[in-house]
Amino acid sequence: MKRAVTDLPPWECMMKKMVWQQMGDITDQKILDFGSGMGVTADHLAEKNDVTAVEPDEDSVRSRWTGNAYTQIVGSTDRLRQFADETFDVIVCHNVLEYALDREQIVTEFARLLKPDGKISIVKHHRAGRVMQMVVLLDNFEHAHDLLDGKSGVSSQYGSIRYYEDADIEKWCSALTITKTLGMRTFWDLQQNQEQHGDPAWQDQMIGIEMRVSEMEPYQDIAFFHHLIIEKKRR
């Protein structure tokens, strides 16, 4: 049975919907989804595109979404090196680099694999938003202080969250430039009426206001996540 994004928990459903809107309409492109997890985004993009998904966790691959046909590879950075130069029009890497020990090499491989007019979509944790989450939602003042001191966070599923700054992408690979920064999850986690979160009408309104402020710097500064659109520098 084909699964729908609305089958996901409300927070994940809204996250997917928002990032897909920010990516825009993508059709007839060759796409790499690196760190594809259970393939929700790969499956979504495969409806209109040629998608290759790379994921190291075999359990995630076994449970992956397969409503649309795409190529699934089990592996990590080693598999990136097997692709030819300038293979992909779009590279997707969502909530992955925080957990990768070789993220500089991954980003360098992305630059090699990206076509000259291609785009990279990276979603990443934003430290300031995480501090707000610790203080406002979780009363975890100790961890908030640790984050302010530059320490890593912890994910129950993936281990250490090694935060990095948006600008680090350009430091790791001088061939790339960030062309757009978008905030994500600025408001909805602060809305504590949990019963509303599963209401599709409420979700639409929340996504609408989130999208409106996603390119406004004051709201980007407190967003829980940043969505970076990256291109190759013009020669």
Image: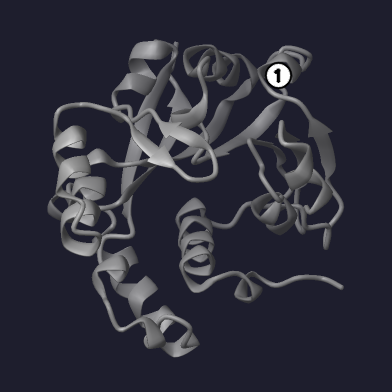
Relative height, residue 86 to residue 24 (above, below): above
Colouring convention used in this rendered image of the protein? one colour
User: Taking 37 as reference, is 83 left or right?
Assistant: right
Residue drawn at point x = 47 percent, y = 14 percent: 104
Q: What's the amino acid at mark 1?
A: Leu
Relative height, residue 60 to residue 43 (above, below): above
Q: Position of residue 109 (x, y in %)?
A: 60, 15
**Towards the viewer: 233 or 200:** 200
Q: Position of residue 117 (x, y in %)?
A: 55, 29
Q: Position of residue 209 (x, y in %)?
A: 29, 72
Residue drawn at point x = 63 percent, y = 36 percent: 35
Q: Quadrant of residue 51?
A: top right
User: Taking 165 as reference, is 11 left or right?
Assistant: right
Q: Quadrant of residue 191?
A: bottom left
Relative height, residue 63 to residue 148 (above, below): below
Q: Position of residue 114 (x, y in %)?
A: 61, 23
User: Taking 132 as reference, is 15 left or right?
Assistant: right
Q: Residue at label 1? A: 80
User: Taking 102 as reference, is 58 left or right?
Assistant: right
**Quarter of the image that includes the C terminus:** top left
**Quarter of the image that includes the N terminus:** bottom right
**Towards the viewer: 42 or 154:** 154
Residue drawn at point x = 25 percent, y = 53 percent: 223
